[in-house]
Structures are given as structure tokens and as C-alpha cells.
Amino acid sequence: SLEIGNWAEKTAANVAERNEMVILSLMRGIIMETPVLEGRLRGNWTASKNKPHRGTRKRPDKTGQPTVARAQNFVERQDLSKDFDIYFTNNLPYAHRIEYDGWSREKAPTGIVRNNLTRISSNL
């Protein structure tokens, strides 16, 4: 009984660690592949728990590092062994156009989110 309990605890910790790695890889990929002119689109990626974030951010992020750090901080504060939804949103009006309408033919001709979901799915 004690051995099974230890095994279950270790397994849950391994699952949470793998979840964190996958989620961060997905978020980091989306952020870093977001086309940059002024950096506003890249800086508007926001993670939230159980409901989508509704607002926009005013700070541009040309390098992606502050936005990646924000996403990482969010993920690290979550108990990933529990069941809940994580939303990763960008509410700028042109985010949808870049993802689906080819607005950034040179930098993201086939989208950003879809490409990263495919990358993550193929690596699982």
C-alpha cells in the first residue's frame, strides 16, 4: 500500500512536470513566432486560468522575453496535477487576421498558433 502510494505520488509529479514542459514550449513557440513590427502583437499574448483574458496590453515586446517570462511565471504558479483549463489569448483585432487570413505572408504565412499546435502534437 505504501509503495503504491509512493508510486502514485511520483507519477503525478512526473505528469505535472511534463505538462509544464509542453505548455511552456507551446507558449514560447507562439510568442517567438509572432511577427514583430512594433512588438504590440507579441506583447499581447496572455495566459489565464479557466476563462479567457479579455483585455489588451499597451506595452510592446519586440524581443519576446518579457512575454515569455510572464507566461512562464503564470505556468509555474499553477498546480498542473489538477484539472483546469489554460487559455492563451491575444485580443488585438489583427491577431485573427494574421493567424487565418495571411496578413503576414512573409513572417507567418500559415499562422502561428496552428503551426505550434502541430509541432507540439507531433512531439508527444
Image (spheres, rainbow, N blue to C red):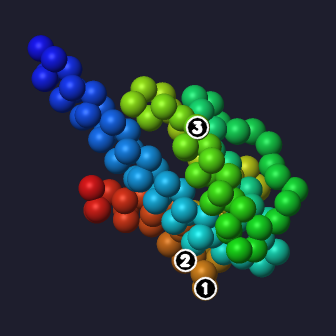
Image position of 119 (left or right of 65) = left
At a point 77% along the width and 78% down the height, the residue shown is: 37
Q: Are marks 1 and 2 in contact (CB under 8 Å)?
A: yes
Judged from the image, the secondary structure of the residue bearing numbered disc 2 is: loop
In percent of width and height, residue 57 lies at 82, 52
Q: In this figure, which residue is indicated by the disc labeled 2?
A: 109
Amino acid type at circle 2 is Pro
Q: Earlier in the sequence, mark 3 or mark 2?
A: 3
Q: Nearer the viewer, residue 92 or 120?
A: 120
Judged from the image, the secondary structure of the residue bearing numbered disc 3 is: loop
Neighbourhood count class around disc 2 (C-alpha, 10 Å): few under 14, some 14–19, many 20 upward: some
Where, by quadrant of the figure, is residue 106 drawn? bottom right
- Label placed on residue 77: 3
Up/down of 106 relative to 116, above or below: below
Image position of 55 (left or right of 107) = right
At a point 41% along the width and 53% down the height, the residue shown is: 21
- Residue 5 can be seen in this image: yes
| Quadrant in which the N terminus is drawn | top left
Q: In this figure, which residue is indicated by the disc labeled 1?
A: 106
Amino acid type at circle 3 is Arg
Q: Please identify the residue farthest to the right as the structure is shown.
A: 58
Neighbourhood count class around disc 3 (C-alpha, 10 Å): few under 14, some 14–19, many 20 upward: few
Q: CA distance from mark 3 to mark 1?
A: 36 Å
Neighbourhood count class around disc 1 (C-alpha, 10 Å): few under 14, some 14–19, many 20 upward: few
